[in-house]
Image (cartoon, rainbow, N blue to C red):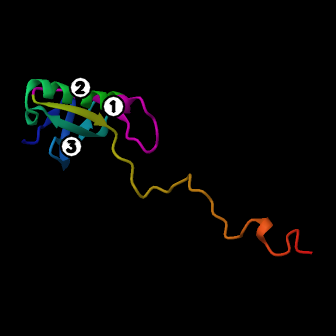
Amino acid sequence: MTTPHHLGKYEITEVLGQGAMGVVYKGFDPGIRRTVAIKTIRRELIEGERAAAAMLARFRNEAQAAGKLAHPGIVAVYDYGEEASVAYIAMGPRAPLNRPRTSRPRVSARPPRSRRCGAGGGR
């Protein structure tokens, strides 16, 4: 599959990754001037109309389900679309993996007070 110049309203700037079912592109939304990741699925790889329809329905359901979620560990879904030979999900760019974790539990080097020598019952 050759790299398209556009998918829907999105300008394609580069390929981020490829898999057996499709390609993930880096894109740009000119309307609100933001960078997006565009996950695609190619219909021609699915044998038969019925299987293709089922695969597209699952892909659309993925977009709808993820679009309802808001969590720092989940990429935001902006859009779902279909063109002649490809369906796509436009989403926010992935957050950096080296971002500091804020919910890490604190670990104390000291044992609990009841286990320290002389704390209570040793007299």
Near mark 1 (Cα within 10 A), the count class, few <14, some 14-19 or many ≥20, is some
Secondary structure under tag 3 reads strand
Q: Quadrant of residue 120?
A: bottom right
Q: Which residue carries the number 2 mark?
A: 57
**Cα distance in 3D space between marks 1 and 3:** 14 Å
Q: Residue at x 10, y 26 (%)?
A: 84
Q: Is residue 107 above or below residue 32?
A: below
Specify whether residue 72 is painted magenta: yes
Q: Residue at x 9, y 24 (%)?
A: 49
x and y percent of residue 83 in the render?
14, 26
| Residue closer to the observer: 81 or 59 | 59
Q: Is residue 10 left or right of residue 78?
A: left
Looking at the rendered structure, the kind of residue marked 3 is: Tyr
Which is nearer the N-term, disc 3 or disc 2?
3
x and y percent of residue 64 in the render?
34, 27
Looking at the rendered structure, the kind of residue marked 1 is: Tyr
What residue range appears in magenta? Answer: 65-84
Q: Is residue 17 above or below residue 112?
A: above
Q: Is residue 34 above or below residue 97?
A: above
Q: Which residue carries the number 1 mark?
A: 78
Q: Which residue carries the number 3 mark?
A: 25
Looking at the rendered structure, the kind of residue marked 2 is: Ala
x and y percent of residue 94 in the render?
35, 46
